[in-house]
């Protein structure tokens, strides 16, 4: 199934509802996400995909008047799967980076993000540069900008990459890692609200280098699906303006992740 680049026309611009259709009548659009990155996307107790990304994606589907099917995919296979047409768009906490923009098109950002270091509370690690962390074991999730970051910034460290962030967290809690790098918000949740994360703490300054965190977090579509991108951007602007975004945000976070401010 390929996305059909058409918009219903013939109505006044002021009153027209932008409608997105798939190539075969009745087909659903397929929304891809990871399902292993709480609270943004995860599998809930009923075995269903849930989280901030999922709620945002499903609301956007309503606004573009399109039924959507959720598809779970390992993180490092998200963009390859999109290009292989396993799904039609991604709402999966993907940083908008120059490298990724060469492969796919991104929507306007739907939230901001920064990365962070996590250390054991007893480690005594306070400096974050290649010399200070030479020989230290540093972990991150494979296929992420965090993996790119530690590979470039800490070339003399012992770098370990994992399939999911949960696996990184597990090795951090078990003492098999000296440092891990991940997104600020999920790791704040992990260190402050879970038993496993009680071992550890957010360390150092937030990592906001645009080379790694890009322009924010966006929805990814195939480059040829220009009309789908326009529809999603229009719907995103609508939910930001009418308060729907904030209602979804407040289910998961104490701050507004669109601005990264407490409101």
Image: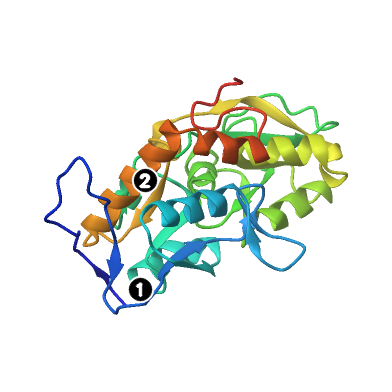
Of 129 and 109, the residue lying toward us: 109
Q: Quadrant of residue 242?
A: top left
Characterize the local packing of mark 2: few (<14), some (14-19) or many (20 or more) Cα atoms within 10 angstroms.
some
Quarter of the image where the C terminus is located:
top right
- Where is residue 222? Give x, y as percent: 29, 61
- Tag 1 residue: 85
Q: Marks 1 and 2, Cα distance to the nearest angstrom?
A: 23 Å
Q: Earlier in the sequence, mark 1 or mark 2?
A: 1
Quarter of the image where the N terminus is located:
bottom left
**Looking at the image, can residue 107 be seen?**
no
Residue pushed farthest left? 10
Residue in view at x 54 percent, y 43 percent? 150
**SS for dot 2:** helix
- Where is residue 229? Give x, y as percent: 29, 52
Q: Quadrant of residue 103?
A: bottom left
- Tag 2 residue: 235
Characterize the local packing of mark 1: few (<14), some (14-19) or many (20 or more) Cα atoms within 10 angstroms.
some
Q: Are marks 1 and 2 in contact (CB under 8 Å)?
A: no
Location of residue 48 with respect to 210 vertically, above or below: below
Q: Is residue 14 left or right of residue 109?
A: left
């Amino acid at each position: 199934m390929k996305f059909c680049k058409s918009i219903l026309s013939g109505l006044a611009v002021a009153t027209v509802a932008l409608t997105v259709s798939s190539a075969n009548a009745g087909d659903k659009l397929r929304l891809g996400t990871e399902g292993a990155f709480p609270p943004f996307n995860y599998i809930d107790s009923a075995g269903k995909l849930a989280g901030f990304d999922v709620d945002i994606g499903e609301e956007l589907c309503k606004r573009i008047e399109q039924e959507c099917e959720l598809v779970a995919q390992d993180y490092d296979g998200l963009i390859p799967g999109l290009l292989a047409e396993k799904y039609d768009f991604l709402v999966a906490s993907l940083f908008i980076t120059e490298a990724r923009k060469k492969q796919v098109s991104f929507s306007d950002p739907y939230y901001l993000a920064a990365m962070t270091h996590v250390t054991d509370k007893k480690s005594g690690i306070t400096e974050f540069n290649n010399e200070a962390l030479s020989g230290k074991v540093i972990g991150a999730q494979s296929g992420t900008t965090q993996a790119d970051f530690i590979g470039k910034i800490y070339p003399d460290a012992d770098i370990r990459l994992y399939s999911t962030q949960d696996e990184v967290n597990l090795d951090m809690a078990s003492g098999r890692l000296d440092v891990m790098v991940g997104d600020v918000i999920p790791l704040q949740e992990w260190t402050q609200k879970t038993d496993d994360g009680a071992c550890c703490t957010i360390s150092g300054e937030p990592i906001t280098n645009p080379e790694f965190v890009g322009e924010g977090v966006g929805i990814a579509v195939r480059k040829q699906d220009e009309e789908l991108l326009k529809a999603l951007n229009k719907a995103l602007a609508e939910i930001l303006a009418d308060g729907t975004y904030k209602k979804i945000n407040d289910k998961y976070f104490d701050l507004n992740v669109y601005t990264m401010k407490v409101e």
